[in-house]
Image: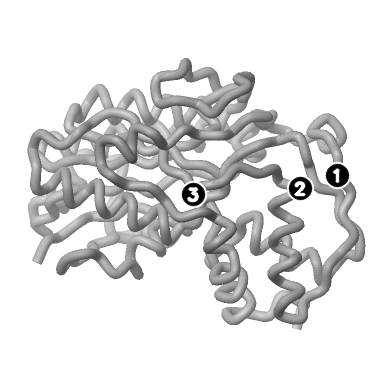
Amino acid sequence: MTVVMVTGGSGQLGGALRRLSWPRPVEVVAPLRDELDLADADAVSGYLLATGARAVINAAAYTAVDRAESEQAAAFHANAQIPAAIAEAARSADVPLIHVSTDYVFDGGLARPYEVGDVVAPINVYGASKAAGELAARAIQPRSAVVRTSWLVSPDGRNFVTTMLRLAHERPRLRIVADQHGRPTIADDLAKALAGIALRMIDDPEAPTGVFHAASEGETTWFDFAAAVFAEGALRGGPVPELDAIATADYPTPARRPLNSRLSTARLTRDYGISLPPWRERLPDLVGAILDRAPLNGA
């Protein structure tokens, strides 16, 4: 039995990693916050040794993008200081680290998908804190894979798909941003990709390290993504609100968003033979899982 430590086990991605059918027998250990202080490198190292974990997947993060603008210390603690401590523990225990990051480390100014080597230039506090976490992970534990992803969605918690399905029951008309471009990522598919990276790094000390991008195949905008979600909901008897396409400038938020969040996943496919399925193919299952799990009409 191979033991893999997952941090952030109660989040969207952590939950997907815990329920994943791994390709070989794996025990996932995912300590809760009150069980392990992730900011304490010695404590994390001790946990790794005690459990016999052979890799760490860090899915813990502060993800409140707008709130981070006024909670900078909290964002940098969770997204930079904690990854540094986890990386120190992984190096001490001599286990590989897979650290999850974000498309928001980029400013969105390019007219093409971002490659792993493109210049990092975040335009909000959340992105800056995640960029700092990337640097810490790579500098402290050279045997690490930083995996950037984008527009993560799952049946769990609050994300774009669950929010749209809820709002469909609450409002007859919605204004959706149409000039931000990206690749939605299904959490279950990302979890499978991370598992593949982790197991390869466990088995092969020479497995590729550095920065990778992982996102579901297919580009879209928030507006078109919302339309696709409502179309799937309608097939299950859900309401379809009227949609108004608006520009980012028409929907001001505390944190600026990049207009281009498209990530090129070429390196992940080249080095690990991994590509995520198209989000449009996986959307019916996702919407069905959300609607089957709980009513979204306030009942």
- Of 52 and 292, which appears nearest the observer? 292
Q: Residues within 10 Å of mark 2 (few under 14, many from 20)?
A: many
Amino acid type of the residue that numbered disc 1 sits on in the rendered structure: Ala
> Can you identify the residue that label 1 sits on?
245
Determine the residue positioned at 12% across, 59% down: 51
> Can you identify the residue that label 3 sits on?
216
Marks 3 and 2, how far apart in space? Answer: 17 Å
**Do residues under tags 2 and 1 come within 8 Å of each other at their CB atoms?**
yes
Marks 3 and 2, the one that precedes in the sequence: 3
Kindly tell me whether residue 284 is visible in this rendering: yes
Determine the residue positioned at 66% across, 38% down: 66
> Can you identify the residue that label 2 sits on?
223
Q: What SS does tag 1 mark?
A: strand
Marks 3 and 1, the one that precedes in the sequence: 3
- On the image, the x and y values in percent for residue 39 come to 31, 40
Answer with the quarter of the image where residue 69 lies. Answer: top right
- On the image, the x and y values in percent for residue 197 come to 25, 46
Marks 2 and 1, the one that precedes in the sequence: 2
- Of 66 and 182, which appears nearest the observer? 182
Amino acid type of the residue that numbered disc 2 sits on in the rendered structure: Phe
Q: What SS does tag 2 mark?
A: helix
Determine the residue positioned at 12% across, 51% down: 54
- On the image, the x and y values in percent for residue 251 come to 83, 38
Q: By what rule are the colours in the image chosen?
A: one colour
Looking at the image, residue 70 sits to the left or right of residue 21; the answer is right
Q: Residues within 10 Å of mark 1 (few under 14, many from 20)?
A: some
